[in-house]
Image: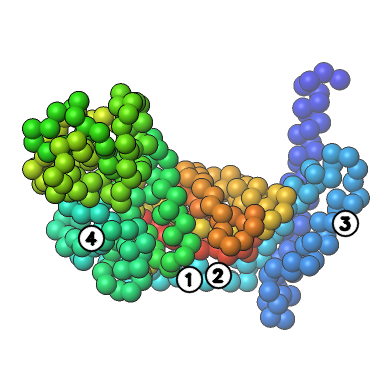
C-alpha cells in the first residue's frame, strides 16, 4: 500500500471514531437525564478513576499513555455536555454573569486609589493612565495596597505585575494568594530609568546608587561601569529619588523616572539607562468587589492542581481544545507546604464568548482551589 491508500484507511477509521463519539454523547444525554431526575452530581470522581484504570489496564506498552490521554479529554467533554443538558451552571459563571449585569457601562474617571511608593513613581503613572482624575494615596509596600483594599480604605489599588526585561514581580504574585481581590483593569507603562543626583554632583563622585530591585535588575549592564559602587535596594524608584533629595551627601544617586527630576529638584546624569529600550511594566488595578466593564477581553485565573502526573497538562489541554490563547503562566510555591504550587494564568478571550463560559465551567471541576481573579481591558 502506498501513502495515499494508508491515508484513505485512516480517513475511514476517523469516520468510525466520530460516529462512535456521537453515540457515546447520546448515551451521556441519558445519563444526564437520570442524574437530574435523581438529584445526582455530574462529577463522579470514583467512577471516572476506576473507568480510566480499567481502560489503561486493558492496553499494553505505549498504548496505555495514549488511552489515558484520550479518555481524560473524552471524560471532560462528556462532563461538560452533561452540565449543559442539566442546565447547571457553576458558581463562578453565576458570579461573572451577575458582575457583568451590575457593573456600570463606563469605567470610573475618578476614585480613591492606593499606590505603592510616592509621587513620581511608575505606579502613579499607571494610575494616571487608567483614571482621568484619580485621588491617589500612597503606602510603602505592595502588601499595604492589598491590605488597604481588603479593609475598605480605598476602592482601587495599583500594583506592578511583570516587566518585559526583569520578569515577574514575585512578591505581588505571592500576595495574590493571601488576599481576596479582583482585577478590574490593567495597563502597560513604558519604563525609562534615569540616573538622578542632587544639582552640582558629578558622575565620578557617585559611590552609592539606590532604587527598587526591579529597576536595578533592568539596568544591570549600565551599572557595570561603576566597579566599586554600592547598590542599595529600597521600596520604590520614586522613594529613592526622594531620599537623594533629602540627603546631605554628594555621592548618592537614584535610578528613577524622569518625572522625579522636577518633583525633587534633582538633575539627570544619564537618561534612559535601562538595558533594553523596549522596557515595559504591566500594572493591574485591583478592587475588593468584582467589576467587569464592557470590552473585557483578558482574564486572570489562579488555581492549584493535584500533585500527580498530567495534572497541569489536563488544565492546559482545555485552553488548546477551546482555542483560547494562554498569554501568561506563572507558578509560585505555596507557603508552608512542601512541593505544592499555585499557578496563575492570563488568557486572551472575550468574557462574552461561549468558549470562555465553557472554560469556566470545566476548570471548576478539574482543578483544586480555583479562583477567578477577573476579566478586564488592558490599556496599551
Label 2 or label 4, whichever lies nearer to me, is 4
Label 2 or label 3, whichever lies nearer to me, is 3
- On screen, residue 115 versus residue 218, left or right, reads left
- On screen, residue 337 versus residue 280, left or right, reads right
| Structural crowding at the residue carrying mark 1, measured as other residues with C-alpha within 10 Å and reported as few (<14), some (14–19) or many (≥20) | few
| Structural crowding at the residue carrying mark 2, measured as other residues with C-alpha within 10 Å and reported as few (<14), some (14–19) or many (≥20) | some
Q: Earlier in the sequence, mark 3 or mark 4?
A: 3
In which image quadrant can residue 99 be found? bottom left
Q: CA distance from mark 4 to mark 1?
A: 35 Å
2 and 3 marks in contact (CB < 8 Å) = no
Q: CA distance from mark 1 to mark 3?
A: 36 Å
Q: CA distance from mark 2 to mark 4?
A: 41 Å
In which image quadrant can residue 258 be found? top left
| Structural crowding at the residue carrying mark 3, measured as other residues with C-alpha within 10 Å and reported as few (<14), some (14–19) or many (≥20) | few
Q: CA distance from mark 2 to mark 3?
A: 30 Å
2 and 1 marks in contact (CB < 8 Å) = yes
Provide the residue designation for mark 3: 54
Amino acid at each position: 500500500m502506498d501513502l495515499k491508500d494508508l491515508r484513505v484507511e485512516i480517513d475511514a477509521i476517523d469516520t468510525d471514531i466520530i460516529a462512535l463519539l456521537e453515540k457515546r454523547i447520546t448515551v451521556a444525554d441519558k445519563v444526564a437525564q437520570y442524574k437530574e431526575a435523581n438529584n445526582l452530581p455530574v462529577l463522579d470522581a470514583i467512577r471516572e478513576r476506576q473507568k480510566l484504570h480499567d481502560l489503561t489496564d486493558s492496553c499494553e506498552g505505549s498504548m496505555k499513555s495514549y488511552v489515558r490521554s484520550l479518555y481524560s479529554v473524552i471524560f471532560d467533554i462528556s462532563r461538560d455536555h452533561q452540565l449543559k443538558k442539566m442546565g447547571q451552571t457553576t458558581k463562578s459563571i453565576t458570579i461573572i454573569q451577575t458582575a457583568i449585569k451590575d457593573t456600570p457601562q463606563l469605567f470610573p474617571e475618578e476614585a480613591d486609589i492606593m499606590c505603592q511608593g510616592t509621587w513620581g513613581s511608575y505606579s502613579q503613572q499607571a494610575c494616571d493612565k487608567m483614571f482621568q482624575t484619580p485621588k491617589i494615596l500612597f503606602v510603602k509596600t505592595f502588601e499595604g495596597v492589598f491590605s488597604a483594599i481588603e479593609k475598605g480604605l480605598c476602592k482601587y489599588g495599583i500594583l506592578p505585575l511583570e516587566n518585559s526585561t526583569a520578569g515577574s514581580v514575585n512578591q505581588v504574585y505571592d500576595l495574590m494568594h493571601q488576599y481576596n481581590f479582583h482585577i478590574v483593569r490593567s495597563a502597560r507603562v513604558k519604563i525609562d530609568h534615569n540616573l538622578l543626583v542632587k544639582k552640582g554632583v558629578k558622575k565620578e563622585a557617585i559611590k552609592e546608587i539606590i532604587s527598587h530591585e526591579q529597576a536595578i535588575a533592568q539596568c544591570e549592564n549600565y551599572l557595570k561601569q561603576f566597579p566599586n559602587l554600592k547598590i542599595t535596594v529600597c521600596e520604590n524608584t520614586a522613594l529613592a529619588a526622594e531620599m537623594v533629595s533629602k540627603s546631605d551627601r554628594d555621592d548618592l544617586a537614584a535610578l528613577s523616572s524622569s518625572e522625579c527630576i522636577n518633583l525633587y529638584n534633582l538633575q539627570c546624569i544619564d537618561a534612559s539607562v535601562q538595558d533594553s529600550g523596549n522596557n515595559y511594566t504591566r500594572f493591574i488595578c485591583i478592587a475588593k468587589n468584582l467589576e467587569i466593564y464592557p470590552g473585557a477581553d483578558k482574564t486572570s485565573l489562579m488555581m492549584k492542581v493535584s500533585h500527580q502526573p498530567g495534572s497541569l497538562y489536563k488544565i492546559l489541554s482545555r485552553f488548546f481544545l477551546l482555542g483560547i490563547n494562554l498569554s501568561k503562566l506563572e507558578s509560585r510555591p505555596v507557603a508552608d507546604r512542601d512541593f505544592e504550587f499555585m499557578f496563575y494564568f492570563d488568557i486572551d478571550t472575550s468574557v462574552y464568548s461561549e468558549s470562555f463560559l465553557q472554560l469556566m465551567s470545566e476548570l471548576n471541576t478539574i482543578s483544586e482551589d480555583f479562583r477567578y481573579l477577573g476579566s478586564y481591558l488592558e490599556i496599551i
